Image (cartoon, rainbow, N blue to C red):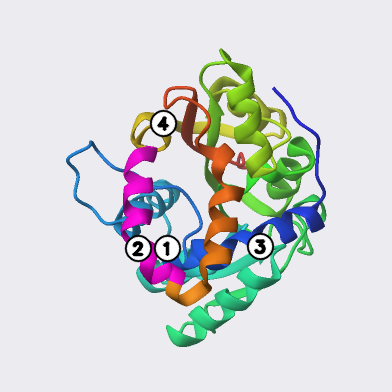
């Protein structure tokens, strides 16, 4: 299932518009959440950080390694990697707002020497071959103008034996396609692969797939818990950003909630660039 493709500048503006409130709600991690069940009392920040940990743990990071955070968001994930694993992180992004916040977070956390950020277009990364030991991509591949080209670029900048782990949405049911179309339009997606299709794209780029999981039930399937958590902070967020901004934020995300909870999956995939 595909929609109209967009270019990196469009994606950058998309996140510039939506990330300020999202950054506030999720504490610098502009990706999905993970709740075990309806009774799980984790805060939104805790639930979002579960995704960060779940994906990064599959990389098996070692102190001193160099990690590419492909689509680094407002920087909280890169800071977490630098502080927790002792790695060097280069974050790339196309959102001016998110890059500014990422620089601020690294300075505030005293890891500016380990976590650095720059504008970067996935289609033509400004790095030599074999630069990185690992690549992390949290919900950023979904916005790639040409997914196969982007995966080839990530393959190129990884050293032989280097790892890639990513999380992203997947199509689980194509019934009521109009609901899925609204979801895709809201997120500016020009494709929504199934899990097998995600794996095929990786293999076509040269990667050897090593691990994958489908956890959509605990992610998109818990969208009602996100709404509850966001509404609990409505007055606080409104006081900071204003009623008009909050109303626009809600309007921009209306289509995200259109699919039924079992229509949209969430995959975590790990692969490796083969050794020579």
Cβ–Cβ under 8 Å for marks 2 and 1: yes
Residue under the point 53% across and 31% down? 258
Magenta residues, as a range? 223-238
Disc 1: which residue: 25
Closer to the chain start, of discs 2 and 3, is 3
In the picture, residue 124 is in which quadrant? bottom right
Disc 2: which residue: 233
Badge 3: how crowded within 10 Å, few (<14), some, or many (20+)? some
Is residue 271 something one can see in this rendering?
A: no
Frontmost of labels 2 and 3 is 2
Closer to the chain start, of discs 1 and 3, is 3
Frontmost of labels 1 and 4 is 1
Frontmost of labels 2 and 1 is 2
Of helix, strand and loop, which one carries label 1?
Answer: helix
Residue under the point 42% across and 83% down? 109
Residue under the point 36% across and 29% down? 217
Disc sitting over residue 216 in the figure = 4
Q: CA distance from mark 1 to mark 3?
A: 14 Å
Disc 3: which residue: 17
- Tell me: residue 30, above or below residue 55: below
- Tell me: residue 222, above or below residue 193: below
149 magenta-colored: no
Of helix, strand and loop, which one carries label 4?
Answer: helix
């Amino acid at each position: 299932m595909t929609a109209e493709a967009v270019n990196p500048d469009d994606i950058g503006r998309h996140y510039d518009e939506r990330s300020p409130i999202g950054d506030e709600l999720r504490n610098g991690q502009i990706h999905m959440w993970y709740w075990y069940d309806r009774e799980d009392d984790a805060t939104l920040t805790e639930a979002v950080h579960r995704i960060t940990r779940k994906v990064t743990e599959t990389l098996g990071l070692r102190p001193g390694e160099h990690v590419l955070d492909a689509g680094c968001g407002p920087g909280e994930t890169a800071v977490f990697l630098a502080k927790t694993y002792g790695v060097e992180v280069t974050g790339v992004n196309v959102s001016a707002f998110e890059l500014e916040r990422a620089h601020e977070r690294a300075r505030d956390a005293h890891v500016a020497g380990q976590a650095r950020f720059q504008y970067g277009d996935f289609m033509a990364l400004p790095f030599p071959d074999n630069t990185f030991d690992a690549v992390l991509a949290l919900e950023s591949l979904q916005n790639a103008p040409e997914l196969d080209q982007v995966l080839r670029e990530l393959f190129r900048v990884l050293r032989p034996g280097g790892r890639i782990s990513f999380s992203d949405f997947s199509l689980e049911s194509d019934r009521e396609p109009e609901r899925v179309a609204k979801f895709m339009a809201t997120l500016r997606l020009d494709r929504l692969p199934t899990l097998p299709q995600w794996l095929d794209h990786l293999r076509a780029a040269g990667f050897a797939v090593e691990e994958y999981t489908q956890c959509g039930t605990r992610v998109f399937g818990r969208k009602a818990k996100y709404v509850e958590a966001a509404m609990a902070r409505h007055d606080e967020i409104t006081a900071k950003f204003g009623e008009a901004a909050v109303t626009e934020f809600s309007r921009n995300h209306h289509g995200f909630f259109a699919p039924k909870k079992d229509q949209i999956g969430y995959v975590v995939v790990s692969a490796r660039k083969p050794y020579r």
